[in-house]
């Protein structure tokens, strides 16, 4: 079980023959992900990692029945890659690429939504359903199977959180890095809805950060619609105003988007908010007992 | 990326967003010559630095004669301008902008920015021109008009009319305003701006509008397709250490505490600062060494952190994923040999091959290196080390 992807997902890799994409595709295959082929324009007909290469996503879908795509292409091609995947009927589009212009992501997301597909990212580590499918660049070994869902804006902090959950004797259903750009494909709410419906998931950990108001929207949603317990951590309690902290969207604009504002909204929604990033594992045990 | 007012106004001009007549000057002679060429009885002399609040800091002055232009320019060029946005050290004024003084009928505010909630641009207008928009929003929220512009249809006449109605403009003013706002939207979209602010926007006696001030920020991710904008980058306006770090793919931001931090990943880097504070210390910096930390980047990271003389201890917090911890441990040892790390370094490595990494560090027997087994343990040890305990 888990959400969005599982062992039955038929995955293609866009940018398949590139150096980074090859490395990560190998890791995904090793994890057991059902990678059925890849796309590199102009290289259709070749074989790479014992799988067929296609020149277009449409060809790949027609020949393999792929329903999921992992995008590992340079930023100036990435928005096109997202739209091509949606156009070809791919249902779950996972975009790892970092550095895509915001206006391009805005159009890409509109199109993906129109096509009824789901976009994860961009600028994220991807999605993993423990023991079934790893569609991203995260280290698979950390994500032991269990009953906790993870949604996070940050990469390494996702690994930290998952590691704490596993060390606490629990495990993961699905973990998703949603990215920290100003516009992202799937938000906390989109994924919380799916975790609420997933029978395997008993609790959800969300990891937010300064900037924007997705965590505040999530707080409203949790308050009105979630029955499963939620644990949250917000990074950037000590971040200065007006400075971009690594992620393009991680910036306190004026007095908006502070960690404090988000933490209190989540607390009001009944979420177990961790002040310290070291308490995520323990807090998850507590909400489940 | 930010640009100067004079550059923003040049872009405005190219797009038909009307501006007062003005010229940039870097020397006294240029300043006087610029004023001579601008047909006006008075001139405004404006310091060109990347910071708001220039007027209050003495960076905007009116001159009534060419002699006065010269005196003002003399004082302004080379001064350290301190505003609420520059920090106490201020910013060196290397360029000034000389502009005609146009008669003002009324002042407004006009801005265009990405609305992250709606995921589309929003145009913001207010009758309270000249005031900080944050302050207006807090004190007079009903004096702010916001119109979202769906990029599928772009800027339309009705957007302009809605804003103009909100500002209480008459029919002719409304028409002129709409034309002005449409030009602004074209600039925003075509040049991948992330923010445009005109404060104040001025209504002239003839019921047309001009931009008295101009601020534009651009989406860094889109600069690859705008070489003309990238050319406007003024490196002297950027923090030199942050700039140097970025050349090594390090993301460094200096803070005021004494516990230096070196972390992989932006979210984990922020969290590391947070936990240092929780453990009773103060972080000295944000430093993200990126996904593929190597011996070279780790060495550069140490060097940059140690340049800050406040730093009394360093916390290296790496969660190894695809990058294996043993490689990073070796990187730390190489870096420690290469540069003289004069303060205690607390190292916490977790994730792939963390056990091997710990062994490597412990076997090396470097007195300054203290190992930690978790995030909390590492933060605690680093804070204690910085206190000299």
Image (cartoon, coloured by chain):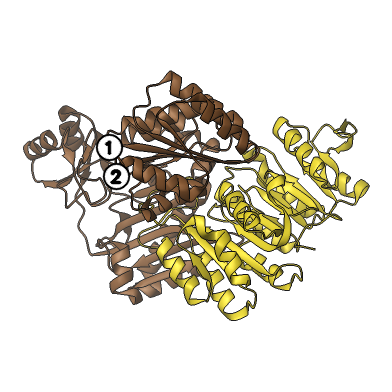
Chain colours: A yellow, B brown
Is residue B200 shown above or below B174?
A: above
- The one nearer the camera, A237 or B238, is A237
Is residue A157 shown above or below A254?
A: above
Compare marks 2 and 1 and give the one earlier in the sequence: 2
User: Is label 2 or label 1 in front?
Assistant: 1
Residue A1 in the figure: left or right of residue B160: right
Residue occupied by mark 2: B256
Q: Residue at x 69, y 68 (%)?
A: A195
Q: Locate the C terminus of chain B by quadrant.
A: top left
Element type at mark 2: loop
Residue occupied by mark 1: B310
- Residue A150 in the image: x percent, y percent? 64, 60
Q: Residue at x 32, y 60 (%)?
A: B208
- The one nearer the camera, A196 or A76, is A196
Pointers 2 and 1 in contact (CB under 8 A)? yes
Spatial CA span between label 2 and label 1: 8 Å
Q: Chain of mark 1?
A: B
Residue A25 in the figure: left or right of residue A95: right
Q: Quadrant of residue B11?
A: top left
- Judged from this view, the residue extending furthest toward the bottom is A224
- Residue A196 in the image: x percent, y percent? 69, 72
Q: Residue at x 52, y 30 (%)?
A: B362
Residue A232 in sight: yes
Q: Residues within 10 Å of mark 1 (few under 14, many from 20)?
A: some
- Residue B372 in the image: x percent, y percent? 49, 41
Is residue A228 shown above or below A276?
A: below
- Residue B309 in the image: x percent, y percent? 27, 33
Q: Chain of mark 2?
A: B
Whether labels 2 and 1 share one chain: yes
């Amino acid at each position: 079980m888990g959400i969005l992807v599982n062992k039955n997902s038929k995955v293609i890799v866009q940018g398949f023959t590139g150096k980074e994409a090859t490395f990560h595709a190998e890791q995904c295959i090793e994890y057991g992900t059902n990678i059925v082929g890849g796309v590199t324009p102009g290289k259709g007909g070749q074989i790479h990692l014992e799988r067929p290469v296609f020149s277009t996503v449409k060809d790949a879908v027609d020949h393999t029945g792929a329903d999921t795509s992992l995008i590992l292409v340079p930023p100036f091609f990435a928005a096109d890659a997202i739209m091509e995947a949606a156009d070809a009927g791919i249902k779950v589009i996972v975009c790892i690429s970092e550095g895509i212009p915001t206006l391009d992501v805005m159009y890409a997301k509109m199109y993906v939504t129109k096509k009824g597909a789901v976009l994860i990212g961009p600028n994220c580590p991807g999605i993993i359903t423990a023991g079934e499918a790893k569609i991203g660049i995260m280290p698979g070994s950390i994500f032991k199977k269990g009953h906790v869902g993870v949604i996070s804006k940050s990469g390494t902090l996702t690994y930290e959180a998952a590691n704490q959950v596993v060390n606490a004797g629990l495990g993961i259903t699905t973990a998703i890095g949603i990215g920290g750009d100003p516009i992202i494909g799937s938000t906390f709410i989109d994924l919380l809805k799916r975790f609420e419906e997933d029978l395997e998931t008993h609790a959800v950990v969300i990891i937010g950060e300064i900037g924007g108001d997705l965590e505040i929207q999530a707080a409203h949603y949790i308050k009105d619609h979630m029955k499963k317990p939620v644990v949250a951590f917000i990074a950037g309690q000590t971040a200065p105003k007006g400075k971009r902290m690594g992620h393009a969207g991680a910036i306190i604009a004026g007095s908006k988007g502070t960690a404090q504002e988000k933490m209190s909204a989540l607390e009001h929604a009944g979420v177990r908010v961790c002040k310290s990033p070291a308490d995520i594992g323990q807090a998850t045990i507590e909400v489940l007992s | 990326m930010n640009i100067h007012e004079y550059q923003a106004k040049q872009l405005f001009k190219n797009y038909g967003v009307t501006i007062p007549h003005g010229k940039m000057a870097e020397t006294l002679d240029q300043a006087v010559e610029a004023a001579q060429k601008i047909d006006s009885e008075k001139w405004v002399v404006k310091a060109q630095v990347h910071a708001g609040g220039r007027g209050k800091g003495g960076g905007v002055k009116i001159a009534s004669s060419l002699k006065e232009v010269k005196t003002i320019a003399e004082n302004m060029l080379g001064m350290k301008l301190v505003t609420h946005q520059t920090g106490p050290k201020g910013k060196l004024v290397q360029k000034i902008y000389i502009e005609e003084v146009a008669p003002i009928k009324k002042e407004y505010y006009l801005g265009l920015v990405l609305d992250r909630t709606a995921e589309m641009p929003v145009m913001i207008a207010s009758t309270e021109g000249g005031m900080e928009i944050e302050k207006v929003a807090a004190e007079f929220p009903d004096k702010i008009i916001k119109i979202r512009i769906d990029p599928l249809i772009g800027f339309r006449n009705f957007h302009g009319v809605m804003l103009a109605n909100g500002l209480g403009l008459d029919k002719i003013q409304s028409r002129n305003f709409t034309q002005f706002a449409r030009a602004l939207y074209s600039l925003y979209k075509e040049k991948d701006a992330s923010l445009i602010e005109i404060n104040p926007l001025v209504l002239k006696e003839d019921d047309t509008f001009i931009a008295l001030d101009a601020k534009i920020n651009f989406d860094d991710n889109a600069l690859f397709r705008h070489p003309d904008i990238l050319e406007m980058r003024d490196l002297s306006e950027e923090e030199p250490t942050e700039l140097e770090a970025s050349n090594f793919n390090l993301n460094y931001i200096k803070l005021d505490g004494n516990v230096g931090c070196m972390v992989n990943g932006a979210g984990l880097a922020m969290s590391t600062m947070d936990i240092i504070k929780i453990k009773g210390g103060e972080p000295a910096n944000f430093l993200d060494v990126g996904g593929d930390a190597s011996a070279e980047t780790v060495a550069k990271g140490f060097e940059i952190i140690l340049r800050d003389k406040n730093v009394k201890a360093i916390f290296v917090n790496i969660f190894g994923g695809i990058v294996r911890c043993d490689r990073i441990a070796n990187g730390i040892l190489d870096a420690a040999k290469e540069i003289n790390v004069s303060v205690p370094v607390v190292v916490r490595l977790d994730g792939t091959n963390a056990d091997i990494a710990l062994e490597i560090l412990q076997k090396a027997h470097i007195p300054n290196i203290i190992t930690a087994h978790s995030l909390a343990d590492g933060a605690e040890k680093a804070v204690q080390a910085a206190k000299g305990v």
